[in-house]
Image: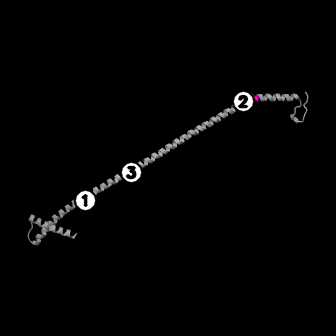
Amino acid sequence: MLPLEGPSLGPLLPEHWSEFIVGIVLFLLIWFVMAKKIVPMFEKMYDERTAEITGGIEKAEKAQAEADAALRKYQAQLANAREEAGQIREEARAQAAVAGAEIKQQASDEAARMVETARAQIEADRTQAVRSLRGESGGLATDLAGKIVGESLSDDERAKRSVERFLGELESQAAETK
């Protein structure tokens, strides 16, 4: 084999042409194997990973869209619930106001009835007291008049007329002083 001559490349320059040709053949062989076997495997793996990543991104976007839709739905339901709660509160306030007014009216009616009953009872007691006082004062007045006059006023009719006249005069004097 003939040695190669040329600029000195040091240990990179083969000593013989045969080494150079073998190096080129081996290089082409390795390049061919890489191009036909190894690079397609890497490409396939790259495509699979790209598909997984793309699928993951699509799934994530889909999940995000579903989450956004669920959030909007939840917010709408929450808004509806708040509105309904407000309506219920307003209805309860209105019912409480009506019930309060009814209770006040019932209490007022009951108080008026109790006052009227008390007035009627007082008037009845007053009338009974007046009758009782008339009877007692009449009897006392008759006894006193009988002692003053010196004659017996035991005649009931005459005594009654005298007592009635006396009490009438007392009442008219009392009315004039008022």
Where does the magenta region start and end? 33-41
At which x and y percent is residue 55?
62, 35
SS class, disc 3: helix
First in residue order: circle 2 vs circle 3 = 2
- Horizontally, residue 151 falls left or right of residue 25, namely left
The image quadrant where one finds the C terminus is bottom left
> What is the CA distance from the residue labelled 2 to the residue labelled 1?
115 Å
In which quadrant will I find the N terminus?
Answer: top right
Q: Is residue 21 magenta?
A: no
Amino acid at pointer 3: Ala
Q: Which residue is mark 2?
A: 40
Q: Is residue 55 placed above or below 86 in the rendered structure? A: above
Is label 2 or label 3 in front? 2
Q: Is residue 133 left or right of residue 5?
A: left
Amino acid type at circle 2 is Pro
Q: Amino acid at mark 1?
A: Arg
Q: Position of residue 159 (x, y in %)?
A: 11, 66
Dot 1 corresponds to which residue? 119
| Image x and y of residue 41, in percent | 71, 30
